[in-house]
Structures are given as structure tokens and as C-alpha cells.
Amino acid sequence: PRQPYDDANIFARILRGEIPCNKVYEDDFALAFHDIAPQAPVHVLVIPKGPYVSWDDFSAHAPADLIAGYVRAVGHVARELGLVDPGYRLLANIGVDGGQEVPHLHIHLFGGAPLGRMIS
Ligand code: 5GP
């Protein structure tokens, strides 16, 4: 079953242009912007353009072109930010145990320094 999606969540408001963001990349499928409270020299959030709460919701219910476009956008951002050679980290917090704060699927992209073994 679909998870209920809250249209008032902060990332939905950013997607609608109601709240500004520091944009890194945008296409028909995804929007990438700098995290407001960066936890690494580079900390970008990449979100799909659709009402999906979680990875499981998105992967089960999003159309294939959106899934492909979103995955491609994450890689595009990593390349555009010059992170391919030094490397980077992707992270998605999902649900209560995952510590998800914003109920719109997002991938954190961390980079710009050695990140050690920490995962969040
Ligand atoms: P989560 O814990 O849900 O994986 O992460 C949510 C992230 O969104 C946090 O890293 C937080 O700093 C970021 N964030 C929350 N509100 C805003 C906002 O209004 N603008 C931006 N750019 N980032 C936000």
C-alpha cells in the first residue's frame, strides 16, 4: 500500500517554489540543493519530483522513467561537484528507526573531505 504523503512537508514546499533553496541541479525528475545544516564540506540533498515518502514507496510505485531519472540525477550531481575521484557518500534515512525527519524521499550526498567510517 502507498504511504500517505504530506503535501505540506518542507521539501514539497521547496519543490513548489514556496520556500527557497540553494539549488545545485534540477531536471524533470529531480531537484538537488544544499542542506541547510551541512554535516560535511559538501552536503547536498537530492529529491525526486513526486509524492514519495520513502525508498520502498518510491521503488514500488514511481514510474520507471522517474526512478531512472532520479538515479541518474544523483550521479550527475556527484560528477558536477567533482566528487567522483575523491569519492563521496550517499545516505537515505527512512522512517522512524532510520531517523527520517522530512517525509519526502531524499538522498544525502556527502563529500569534500575524508568521511571516515561514520554513517550519519
Ligand atoms: P533526514 O533526517 O530527514 O534524512 O534529513 C533531513 C535533512 O533536511 C537534514 O539534514 C536537514 O538539515 C535538512 N533540512 C531540513 N529543512 C531544510 C530546509 O528548509 N532547507 C534545506 N536546504 N534543508 C533542510
Image (spheres, grey):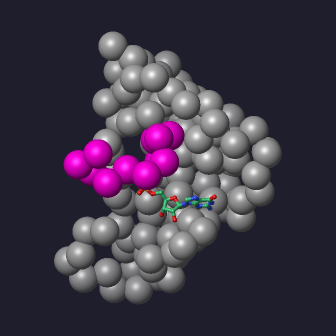
> Where is residue 119, by image quadrant?
bottom left
Whole-percent x, y for residue 47 in the image? 54, 45
Decide which of 116, 77 is in the foreground and name it.
116
Task: Say left or right for 53 vs 35.
Answer: left
Q: Does the segment drawn in magenta span residue 25?
A: no
Task: Say left or right for 73 vs 3.
Answer: right
Whole-percent x, y for residue 39 in the image? 44, 77
Look at 56% across and 66% down and name the residue there.
Answer: 35
Quarter of the figure with the N terminus = top left
Report the span colored magenta: 96-106
Q: Does the segment drawn in magenta span residue 98?
A: yes
Asked whether residue 103 is in view, the answer is yes
As drawn, 83 above or below 44: below
How many numbered markers are drawn?
0
Decide which of 103, 111 is in the foreground and name it.
103
Q: Main secondary structure of the magenta part?
A: loop
Whole-percent x, y for residue 15 in the image? 69, 42
As drawn, 99 above or below 41: above
Quarter of the figure with the C terminus = bottom left
